[in-house]
């Protein structure tokens, strides 16, 4: 019953998930077991790149869940992503221990430079992995809860909601830029050494993180799929399509929206936590409102309200970005910008909508 | 057509693309590849694009001279798009996919910090051309820009001794370079008997545009009867509104001079310089220096870029020095093998553009002259002071509590980036 | 560690003297052998010295100036004034032609002949120390200058450098003939400062009385030193009282200054946001490319200055309509090309216009390079309106404030009093009904968007006077603009005005104690909380128009 609901009824999703699963199996083998001079060898660079894309895909999933299904456009999802990243970054920083450049047993290098006496209270506990992971979920979750509670209760919707979420991530960016905040200012957190005792520069650790991201994406997808196909999911779609009518039918519209928002924020935070050890740096730039808009663009490009479309969008836009920044640095913004315009104008249902149109035609023949 | 078929075709396209990528990196084995890692889009493009062009010009010139070790040099340009994680990713791409033998790149401290672990992991060579806060040393990085003791401290000395400044405003953008530099300067000034209340420290966000309040405050601070100067580590975009506000509020260079560490010829080319005349900057190079090397360099630059209005600046000279040093070291080592080149780098001497000879030191910093110039209304600097000898770059500041005992020496027997001279040991993360 | 070459005037004079001495010694035998009747080392004439200004390095120039000052020559004041202002030019000939520039006119510094249009003249460089030296000399010469501003500056210079017996005598001599009240007051203050230090007890008492009316920083410093250190208790308390009364007035002026700063910041927010108040507020289009339209306006200003280099003074006035037209056309193109397909889907327009903003930014980068462009400020917009020594208002800010308000009221007039405005409001409130009564809604949409865009362009002209003109200009203002419109209440122009001004004021009053960074964060948090309280902003639309 559950498999039927989650998997079989969702052809596109199955295909995308299948591809993700296939990559998860093949890439590590080609990276670890194949000699470097073989044409089949997948380089560390590619593993890192794919790992990053997987995190972005998870992030896109979280955006699609609330935008595609509940019609809540958040232009501040980068904030939750970054907070999750910072929580992970703080754990990784604490793991450096006395191997910083000044050899201080407890303080981070940037704290030594600023002449701080002791570790600020909010850095306590982050030397424990479980605590850090708890914070990855709790901090963004709480922020989403408070913010969402305030916003949904006073019925801030649509464009207004989009703009205040943008203000939220902008405010957080400015705050994290301040060196007094104790998060390393503009330099952010970097120069990580190891995670759970594994050397971050080692090939196997990289592959491990890659696989972890992949599993997180698959599980995240399942969870989202579970939610949207549940009774709650149907109420949420009803809210998207006719909020007042749903409210008048006796549903607690606000609490449905709120819980979905919190869940989505946590999902974004997990993506952030997996992203940071793979790219090796987290800095306030991640809070930038432009990043958050870009996330929405991934979803729109892939196809809003389908979940797997978000994954397709995250992969294709980011692949295009990587491709063009290398081969045509001067024109990639033209291409990227043009792509956004064309997709919204010509493909209102995104790339997967295009496939749908074709496949439906094919079915008719 | 079914969905599956389309997916297959798209997949095939992807494979084709990645194969093309592989093929591109595999071709032309007989060249020596040089990575150029400067942002060509995003907020940093304004500064970094010029450095990319400089590198392409230097490589072209070297190729005209017959290349290096009998091979042609091949530049590999990538765009990290002012995105810090992307800097690390691109570095990995340059080193792993393209197999470059040296990377010239980065501008901001955070981009360097992002690149650093990758360069160390993959044992590459990075030349970093911008003045920075120090407090770092890596075996794989050569710092051709100024350390604080090659820019900030001489500038403060000049103000203190020659201009007679007694009250100090340390104004900066809130990030690591101004924070560290100002801490060093604060400690230095206090060590020289400046009282706490004669130092005002102010930090502003990136791109700060509304300077009315701060300039008014500086004016008040400067009217206490003692000669006052502003030491500015204000970065990039925030400078234009800052200087405009100074000019508008009638703060002239004779009353309260501003000495800046991040304002060079290129920044000035985007500003109406009339209200700035007389304000100062401390650098290791000015375009207005009249040496044969500099004139040749400026001519080459104008010919390359095809625009005689373009200016040259300090980071460009740093790339010029760094590139020539690298060429010399590769020739001396007879190979581009990273370890051998790193060893050959220390002690290499090449002429700089201001009439001296810069030398690579064991701490991977170089010797540079310190010039202090006053801004003229044509956007150029009039040199008012210069050190007689070249100042050696110091990786670890002597004025900071954490680093006063640290030195960096990448030659045997120490071979350590942060060697504590008190405990006679290599601190923290040990080098390979 | 680093020994620095010294270039101060004192050293320069010493060095110059040594050189002169050497020159004399060396030339002696020559003269002896030649047996000429000419007087040995002749004092250089005034004309020779002026020619010398063009040659040699800064040190020699400082020495030459020193020597010039010993000459009593009526041309001296003009030459020194020009040198200090960077208006003294020299050719590369030998001997060089020395010219004084005033505006476009060039006159020969020595014989007064007209040199306008002469080529190959370059500015004689001066540095700060030389400039300081010159200012002191110029002040003495300028005390009798026909221009009262010059005389005022001269007295101010004396006050700043400290008044000694010699200058006090000069000032006393000048005082009875001084016609300008402002200069006369300044002379009083300068003399009081002198008396406070040197006079007898009565004179000092009188000086304190005079100075208690002065807002000069130097007056306060002098009074403070009396209040703290003087032996005479009565003088001490008089000085303390004087400081107190000054302090009260300063507080007041500072408050005025802060209000002005706040309004000025508000006017910039207003300019940036007001175009958006039309496109977003009235039409409901989330135009993420709004910032780039502002950027295009700023680049237009630069373009006008490049195209008409002779009309710098007029460039802003030409740029305003030009920027309006260009950005309005770009706006109409955007509306016709993209946005009209997306009405009713506000979130999609957000994405499409975001894409457009990337394209526009990169287009500017490709066309004009990623470097900032230098936009010159015309003479009339530079400088300060100095009300008193503690309160001065910069003209740029003042004009931008007035300009912002003018644009606002013009727009209000268009929206409320013209047929176009009527139709715009009709279409935005009920499209179907408007069409039914014969409004060409497509046409109105394009015009409205063009109007909003054009105003963004006009804002760009104003912003070019205070900030960078570069590809990133737009990004810096887009978020603030949206905040202003949302805070004020979408669709309400008055709301936009009130919200821009109040955000400017709040920001400015927070800044001194919270720091620039935290102030901005606090304002954003306040804004977020406010929107939760009043989701439709300060002035929500009421009635049918408010329905979603």
Image (cartoon, coloured by chain):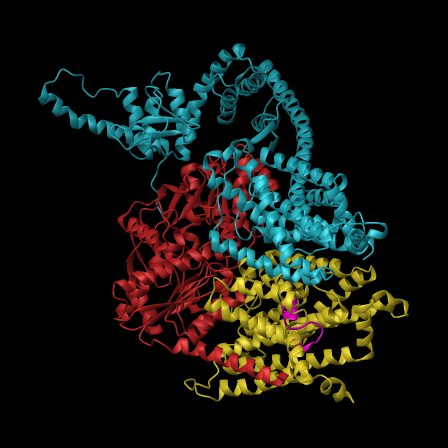
Chain colours: A yellow, B red, C cyan
Judged left or right of residue A10, residue B274 is left
Residue A163 x %, y % = 71, 58
Q: Quadrant of the N terminus of chain B?
A: bottom right
- Residue at 30% x, 45% y: name it: B290
Quadrant in which residue B423 is drawn: bottom left
Q: Is residue C156 above or below residue B31?
A: above
In this picture, residue A46 sits left or right of residue C252: left
Instruction: Decide whether the magenta segment is chiefly helix, strand or loop.
Output: helix
On the image, which quarter does residue C185 sit in?
top right
The spot of residue C101 in percent (x, y) is: 40, 27
In the image, residue A205 above or below residue A343: below
Q: Position of residue C520 (x, y in %)?
A: 66, 50
**Could you say which quadrant of the image residue A234 lies in?**
bottom right
Q: Is residue A254 visible?
A: yes
Furthest-top residue in this view: C176
Give the residues in magenta. Answer: A296-309
For residue B208, say whether it is visible. no
**Which residue is pictured at 36% across the width and 31% down the height?**
C9
**Image quadrant containing the C terminus of chain B:** bottom left
């Amino acid at each position: 019953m559950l498999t039927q609901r989650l998997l079989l009824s969702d052809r596109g999703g199955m295909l995308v998930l299948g591809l993700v699963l296939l990559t998860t199996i093949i890439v590590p083998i080609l990276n670890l077991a194949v000699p470097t001079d073989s044409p089949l060898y997948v380089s560390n660079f590619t593993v890192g790149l794919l790992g990053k894309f997987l995190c972005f895909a998870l992030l896109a999933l979280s955006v699609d869940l609330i935008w595609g299904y509940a019609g809540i456009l958040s232009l501040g999802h980068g904030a939750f992503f970054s907070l999750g990243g910072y929580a992970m970054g703080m754990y990784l920083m604490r793991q450096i221990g006395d191997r910083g450049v000044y050899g201080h047993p407890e303080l981070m290098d940037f704290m030594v430079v600023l002449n701080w006496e002791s570790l600020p209270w909010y850095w306590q506990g982050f030397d424990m992995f479980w605590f850090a992971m708890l914070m990855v979920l709790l901090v963004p979750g709480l922020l989403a809860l408070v913010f969402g509670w305030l916003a949904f209760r006073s019925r801030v919707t649509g464009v207004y909601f989009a703009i205040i979420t943008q203000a939220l991530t902008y405010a957080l960016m400015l705050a994290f830029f301040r060196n007094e905040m104790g998060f390393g200012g503009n330099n952010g957190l970097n120069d990580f050494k190891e995670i759970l005792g594994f050397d971050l520069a080692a090939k196997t650790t990289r592959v491990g993180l890659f696989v972890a991201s992949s599993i997180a994406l698959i599980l995240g997808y399942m969870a989202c799929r579970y939610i949207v196909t549940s009774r709650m999911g149907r109420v949420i779609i009803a809210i998207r399509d006719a909020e007042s009518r749903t409210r008048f039918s006796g549903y607690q519209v606000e609490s449905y929206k709120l819980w979905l928002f919190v869940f989505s924020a946590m999902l974004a935070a997990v993506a952030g936590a997996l992203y940071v050890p793979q790219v090796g740096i987290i800095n306030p730039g991640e809070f930038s409102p432009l990043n958050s808009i870009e996330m929405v663009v991934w979803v729109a490009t892939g196809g809003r309200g389908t979940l797997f479309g978000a994954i397709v969008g995250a992969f294709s836009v980011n692949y295009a970005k990587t491709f063009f920044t290398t081969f045509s640095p001067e024109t990639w913004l033209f291409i990227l910008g043009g792509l956004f315009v064309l997709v919204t104008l010509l493909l209102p249902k995104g790339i997967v909508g295009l496939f749908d149109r074709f496949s439906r035609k094919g079915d008719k023949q | 057509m079914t969905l599956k078929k389309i997916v297959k075709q798209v997949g095939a396209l992807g494979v084709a693309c990645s194969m093309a990528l592989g093929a591109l990196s595999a071709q032309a084995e007989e060249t020596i590849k040089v990575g150029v890692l400067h942002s060509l889009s995003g907020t940093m493009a304004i500064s970094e694009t010029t450095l990319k062009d400089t590198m392409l010009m230097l490589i072209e010139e070297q190729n005209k001279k017959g290349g290096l070790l009998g091979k042609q040099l091949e530049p590999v340009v990538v765009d990290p798009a002012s995105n810090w994680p992307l800097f690390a990713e691109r570095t990995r791409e340059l080193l792993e996919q393209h197999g470059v033998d040296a990377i010239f790149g980065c501008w901001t401290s955070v981009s360097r910090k992002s690149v650093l672990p990758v360069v160390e992991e993959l044992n590459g060579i990075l030349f970093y051309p911008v003045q920075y806060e120090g407090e770092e040393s890596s075996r794989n990085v050569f710092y051709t820009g100024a350390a604080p003791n090659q820019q900030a401290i001489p500038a403060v000395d000049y103000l203190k001794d020659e201009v007679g400044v007694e009250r100090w405003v340390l104004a900066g953008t809130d990030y690591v370079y101004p924070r560290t530099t100002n801490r060093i300067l604060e400690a230095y000034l206090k060590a020289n008997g400046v009282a706490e209340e004669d130092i005002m420290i102010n930090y502003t966000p990136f791109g700060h545009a509304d300077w009315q309040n701060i300039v008014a405050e500086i004016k008040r601070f400067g009217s206490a009867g003692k000669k006052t100067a502003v030491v500015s580590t204000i970065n990039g975009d925030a400078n234009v509104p800052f200087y405009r506000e100074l000019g508008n509020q009638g703060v002239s260079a004779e009353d309260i001079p501003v000495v800046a560490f991040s304002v060079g010829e290129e920044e000035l080319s985007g500003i109406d310089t009339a209200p700035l005349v007389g304000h100062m900057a401390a650098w290791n190079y000015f375009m207005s220096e009249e040496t044969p090397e500099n004139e040749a360099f400026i001519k080459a630059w104008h010919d390359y870029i095809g625009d005689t209005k373009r200016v040259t600046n300090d980071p460009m000279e740093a790339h010029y020095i760094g590139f020539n040093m690298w060429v010399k070291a590769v020739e001396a080592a007879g190979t581009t093998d990273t370890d051998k080149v790193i060893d050959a780098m220390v002690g290499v001497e090449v002429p700089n553009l201001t009439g001296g000879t810069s030398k690579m030191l064991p701490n991977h910093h170089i010797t540079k002259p310190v010039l202090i110039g006053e801004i003229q209304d044509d956007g150029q600097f009039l040199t008012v002071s210069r050190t007689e000898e070249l100042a050696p770059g110091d990786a670890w500041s002597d004025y900071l509590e954490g680093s006063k005992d640290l030195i960096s020496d990448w030659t045997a027997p120490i071979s350590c980036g942060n060697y504590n001279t008190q405990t006679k040991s290599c601190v923290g993360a040990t080098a390979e | 560690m680093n020994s620095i070459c010294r270039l101060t005037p004192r050293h320069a004079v010493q060095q110059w003297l040594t050189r002169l001495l050497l020159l004399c010694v060396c030339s002696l035998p020559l003269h002896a052998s030649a047996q000429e009747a000419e007087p040995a080392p002749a004092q250089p004439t005034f004309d020779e010295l002026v020619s010398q200004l063009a040659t040699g390095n800064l040190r020699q120039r400082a020495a030459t100036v020193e020597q010039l000052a010993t000459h009593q020559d009526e041309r001296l004041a003009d030459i020194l004034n020009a040198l200090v202002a960077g208006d003294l030019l020299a050719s590369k000939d030998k001997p060089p032609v020395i010219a004084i520039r005033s505006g476009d006119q060039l006159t020969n510094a020595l014989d007064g002949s007209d040199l306008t249009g002469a080529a190959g003249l370059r500015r004689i460089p001066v540095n700060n120390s030389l400039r300081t030296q010159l200012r002191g000399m110029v002040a003495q010469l300028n005390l009798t200058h026909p221009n009262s501003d010059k005389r005022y500056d001269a007295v101010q210079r004396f006050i700043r450098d400290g008044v000694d017996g010699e200058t006090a005598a000069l000032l006393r001599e000048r005082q009875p003939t001084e016609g300008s009240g402002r200069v006369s007051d300044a002379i009083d203050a300068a003399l009081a400062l002198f008396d406070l230090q040197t006079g007898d007890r009565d004179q000092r008492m009188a000086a304190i009385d005079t100075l208690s009316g002065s807002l000069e920083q130097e007056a306060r410093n002098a009074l403070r030193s009396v209040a703290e250190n003087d032996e005479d208790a009565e003088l001490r308390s008089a000085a303390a009282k004087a400081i107190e009364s000054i302090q009260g007035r300063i507080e007041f002026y500072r408050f005025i200054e802060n209000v002005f700063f706040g309004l000025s910041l508000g006017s910039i927010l207003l300019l940036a946001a007001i175009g958006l108040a039309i496109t977003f507020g009235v039409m409901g289009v989330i135009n993420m490319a709004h910032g780039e339209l502002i950027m295009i306006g700023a680049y237009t200003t630069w373009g006008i200055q490049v195209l008409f280099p002779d009309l710098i003074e007029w460039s802003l006035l030409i740029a305003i309509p030009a920027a309006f037209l260009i950005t309005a056309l770009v706006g109409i193109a955007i509306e016709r090309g993209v946005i009209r397909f997306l009405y009713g889907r506000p979130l999609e327009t957000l994405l499409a216009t975001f894409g457009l903003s990337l394209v526009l930014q990169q287009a500017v980068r490709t066309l004009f390079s990623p470097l900032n462009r230098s936009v010159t400020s015309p003479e009339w917009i530079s400088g300060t309106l100095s009300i008193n020594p503690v309160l001065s208002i910069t003209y740029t800010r003042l004009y931008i404030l007035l300009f912002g308000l003018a644009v606002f009221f013009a727009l209000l007039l268009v929206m409320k009093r013209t047929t176009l405005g009527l139709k715009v409001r009709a279409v935005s409130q009920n499209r179907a009904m408007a069409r039914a009564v014969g409004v060409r809604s497509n046409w109105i949409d394009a015009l409205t968007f063009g109007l909003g865009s054009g105003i963004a362009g006009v804002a760009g002209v104003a912003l070019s006077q205070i900030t960078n003109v570069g590809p990133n200009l737009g990004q810096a203002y887009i978020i603030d603009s949206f905040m202003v419109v949302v805070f004020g209440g979408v669709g309400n122009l008055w709301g936009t005005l009130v919200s821009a001004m109040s955000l400017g004021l709040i920001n400015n009053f927070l800044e001194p104690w919270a720091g620039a960074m935290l102030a901005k964060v606090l304002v954003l948090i306040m804004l977020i909380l406010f929107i939760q309280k009043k989701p439709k902003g300060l002035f929500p639309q009421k009635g049918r128009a408010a329905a979603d």
